[in-house]
Amino acid sequence: MNNQELLKQALQSRFAAHHEWLSIRASGRSFAFRPGELEIEFIHDKLLIGFPDDAGFQTWRVVGFQEKNEEIRLELVRNFERERERIRFVPRRPANELGEAVELARAARADRLAALVVESLPGAKLVRVRLSRENGRSAQILFEDRRGRQTAALGDVSDSLRPETLLSTAVLWLKKLEKRRRHPVDTLWLTAAGKQASKLQRLHALLDDEWRRRIVVKEIGPDTETQSGDRLKDLPALEPADLWRAKTRPAQLHEPAALGELAQNIVALAPDAIDVVFSRGGATLRFNGLAFARARRVFGRERIWFGTEKEKQILTPDNAEELAELIDNLRAFRRHGAPNRRHAFYRDAPEAWLESMLRRNIKKLDANLVLAPLYHQFRAEREKIDLLALRRDGRLVIVELKAAPDRDAPFQIADYWQRIERQRRAGHLQSARLFGELAIADAPAVCYLVAPALSVHRDFALLAGTLAAGIEIHRFHLAENWRAGVKVLERVGR
């Protein structure tokens, strides 16, 4: 028995050990199958494996094998080795098994965090620790001091929560705790580690004085005194002025480049619907905001990749009809009045659709905004802002778009605001001639939240009310049928 036959038997036994498997390609695309759907054959001194995929039943030759824990990694070839693929096969666990294991791990982290909280305050006593009922991703801790006064503590035990989400959760939980008849809580410790703690510290600086007093940011870090384990450390509360003194990188601007002939021809197929967004790597063509093609120059030649899925194909004379068919389908389903509102082309990227409409005519939102130039997805440091415009009085306007309720929107907007303010105060925006010859006023930027009326989260006003008064936010409520045309129903302050 040779090595290939031994490998065949090994693969058969390993696949049979689990009820269901996932095949995961390098692109991230996955497909579930059962061992009974798998074929492993040894033919003409070659080990062949066949398995179902979203493109049908696939047969490959095995040329490489690795195993890590229970994961199987195969290097596969076919078509005289012109096609080569590395595919991972991972056992698919029952959802209830995974859920129980995750919950136990998070509960253990919550207990460890509660111990750190109590250890950091002499005489403190733990009252309660539990996972949040909302999603189980944060630890909610109550403890009391020697006088019996209770304080809350909150921390991320999933390593998945954004700082804006943590801050929103902290404010809303504290609002509930302050209303309790017995042991009302006035103060909350917001715990985090590393970069998350630094980001929370900056967000905390944007709160008003009352909320900056009530919420205290604590950093989880190594105990340098005992050299054993972690401890909670106080992070100094920053003032907004401290943010302006921080080092700021100049904004990244992508000037529109000359569009190649192929890309121009594609845009000409539907000029009222197709727009172009430029970036460092080339140009993205979008149909009512939905990206469907990308153009760039490779060794001096224009290349087009098209498709709405993760895997895209290069445009050639042989598949030009596929691109034409794609655009026809976009015309049919990526429009107001589409025959099927459940179609992916209609549902996907709604905020990009709204943004593309405003790019064509920003005055439908506010007649005081300078129409051109208007920057799409302006990058301030590593964060992207939906739209950045200039008002006639010279003040910058940050436009944040939402097509669905987003509880964290107030703090997302505040974070964008402080990033733009750092750029403006450092003079980077004016020196970059962001708006050509137009001068940017020496005044803070204004923030616009633009969303369909029913897509503004019910807690928006409460959370926005915790921000410092210098952060000016206006809400623009749009008609629900905004795809038919942008119509502002109401404009309100925070």
Image: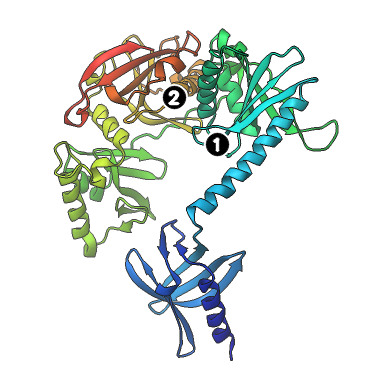
The residue lying toward the viewer, choosing from 70 and 288, is: 70
Residue at far right of view: 226
Relative vertical location of residue 224 with respect to residue 2 in this rendering, above or below: above
Q: Looking at the picture, does residue 301 appear above or below residue 485? A: below
In the displayed structure, would residue 223 be above or below residue 297? above
Q: Which residue is mark 1?
A: 137
- Horizontal side, residue 94 vs residue 404: left or right: right
Q: Quadrant of the C terminus?
A: top left
Q: Position of residue 208 (x, y in %)?
A: 54, 10
The location of residue 472, given as percent across then percent down, is 42, 11
Q: Quadrant of the N terminus?
A: bottom right
The answer for how far apart the CA atoms under marks 1 and 2 are is 42 Å
Circle number at residue 432? 2
Is 110 in front, or is 448?
110
Residue 206, horizontal then vertical, whole percent: 54, 16
Please state which amino acid type lies under the numbered disc 2. Ala
Q: Residue at x 42, y 74 (%)?
A: 36
First of labels 1, 2 by sequence position: 1
Q: Nearer the viewer, residue 444 or 233?
A: 233
**Tag 2 secondary structure:** loop
Viewer can see residue 439: no
455 left or right of 127 in image: left
Q: Residue at x 19, y 28 (%)?
A: 481
